[in-house]
Amino acid sequence: HAERSMYECYDDNYFATDFHIDMFEESFREIMVEHDPIRVGWPMEYLASSLDSYKNMPKRDLILFPHRVAPEKQIEIFRDLKTQLPQYDFIVCQEQSLTKNEYHNLLGESKLVFSANLQETLGISWYEGALVDTIPMVPDRLSYSEMAVREFVYPSEWTESYDKYLHNKKLVVARIQDYMENYTKFLPAIHTQVKKLETEFFSGQSLYNNIRESV
């Protein structure tokens, strides 16, 4: 009800992804006829330069879970992967008492950021990771489907539930091993991914232009 009331009150409603708009339309179709949503990305141009000092850090065999510890993030999959791949370090960031600097250092050192999320309308942490040359491994669903380049998405059914993960565990493990053992092979794709994210999703230029035109 809070989101609906805000949507109806505001003159313009801006969204970062088409997925978020589609999700909103499913819930509030009747009110969105009068208030068309506007897809503009998210105004975070500063993020790239703020992480400059964490680029080119020596990488180690580290895999991060940078999401909230919540049911829709399926942390139990990450915990099981840790038992399957003892040769790598696995860290759940929210279980550490990290300063922002310490968190960004971990991003700079890690080779992989893992997601099995069941809810995501944008996702900032995987963009932060890509900015410091960390591979994002994300499911082909939610906002990831429109945002990620093909090298970094895996079939959605692999982690649609914990049971589905157990059924597809060998495939998930093999994909992680490929990323970790052949990390440098994916660097060009990471740079392509960063370019796509910073121009299409983490720039406020469309937002600023829209506001100027409406004034």
Image (cartoon, rainbow, N blue to C red):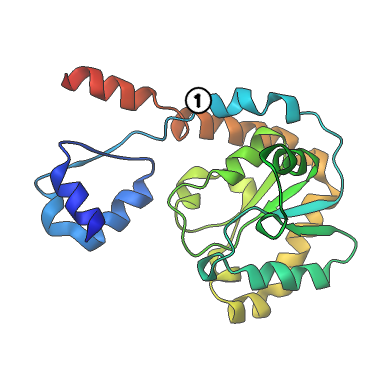
Q: In which quarter of the image is the C terminus?
A: top left
Seen from the viewer's position, the closer of residues 213 and 53 is: 53
The picture places residue 154, in percent across and down from the top left corner, at: 61, 58
- Secondary element under disc 1, as helix, strand or loop, is loop
In this rendering, the answer to whether 82 lies above or below 40 is: below
88 with respect to 120 (left or right) = right
Q: Which residue is drawn at 60% across and 45% down?
A: 126
Q: In which quarter of the image is residue 109?
A: top right
Q: Residue at x 38, y 40 (%)?
A: 16
In this rendering, the answer to whether 136 lies above or below 90 is: above
Seen from the viewer's position, the closer of residues 110 and 167 is: 110
The picture places residue 159, in percent across and down from the top left corner, at: 59, 70
The picture places residue 84, in percent across and down from the top left corner, at: 82, 72
The picture places residue 156, in percent across and down from the top left corner, at: 54, 64
Residue for badge 1: 45
Which residue type carries mark 1? Glu
In this rendering, the answer to whether 9 lies above or below 195 is: below
Q: In which quarter of the image is residue 69?
A: bottom right
Q: In which quarter of the image is the N terminus?
A: bottom left
Q: In which quarter of the image is residue 58?
A: top right
Q: Residue at x 76, y 66 (%)?
A: 173
